[in-house]
Amino acid sequence: MPYDPNPVTERERSNAYFTVWFGLAASLAAAAAALLPLPDQMGQFGALVAGLWILVCVFNRRFDSYFRELRDFGAVVALAIIGLWLAASGFDWLPRPLADPRLLTALAAVGFHVGFLFAQSRGGR
């Protein structure tokens, strides 16, 4: 392993794990707004926060290998949700309210965060 002159501090690591819970709450708000008659701003804000957090997880290189392992598992769960949704919509198995792309993206974000937290609860993949 190469020398890292700026290793991740314990505080940075703790903040990263905490913000996953915040991202989960935001993605749940976006999913709820896609399904229920809630104010548009709630869904938009939830989608914004969840989307930005996922982008931080994807492009930030300061996370340790354990965090990246959890992130990768969350990404697998999100991609599985997208694949199932696409297959169901390809066979026209989705009722109209569930065929909303906003719901797909919100469910993929929920899947990412739930997959991350599930893998964390299991001690990794």
Image: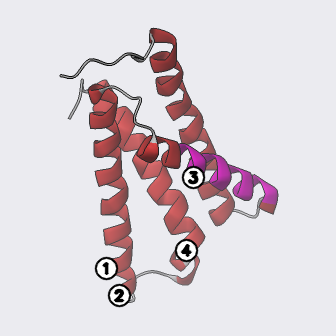
Which residue is labeled 1 in the image? 87
The type of residue carrying mark 3 is Gly
Nearer mark to the viewer, of 1 and 3 = 3
How far separated are the C-alphas under marks 4 and 3?
A: 14 Å
Asked if the residue under mark 1 is in contact with the one under mark 4, i.e. CB atoms within 8 Å, the reply is no
Q: Is tag 4's residue or tag 1's residue first in the polypeptide sequence?
A: 1
Which residue is labeled 4 in the image? 101
Q: Residues within 10 Å of mark 2 (few under 14, many from 20)?
A: few
Which span of residues is magenta-colored?
Answer: 41-53
The answer to whether residue 109 shows anywhere in this view is yes
Q: Does residue 21 appear to the left or right of 26 in the view shown?
A: left
The type of residue carrying mark 1 is Ala
Q: Is residue 40 magenta?
A: no
Q: What residue do we see at 79% from left, 62% from top?
A: 40
Q: How is the image coloured?
A: secondary structure
Question: Of residues 30 and 63, which is closer to you in this image?
Answer: 63
The type of residue carrying mark 2 is Gly
Question: Of residues 90 and 59, which is closer to you in this image?
Answer: 59
Q: What residue do we see at 42% from left, 17% from top?
A: 6
Quadrant housing residue 84:
bottom left
The type of residue carrying mark 4 is Pro
Q: Is tag 4's residue or tag 2's residue first in the polypeptide sequence?
A: 2
Q: Is tag 1's residue or tag 3's residue first in the polypeptide sequence?
A: 3
Label 4: which secondary element: helix
Question: Of residues 52 and 7, which is closer to you in this image?
Answer: 7
Asked if the residue under mark 2 is in contact with the one under mark 1, i.e. CB atoms within 8 Å, the reply is yes
Q: Is tag 4's residue or tag 3's residue first in the polypeptide sequence?
A: 3
How far separated are the C-alphas under marks 4 and 1?
A: 14 Å
Which residue is labeled 3 in the image? 51
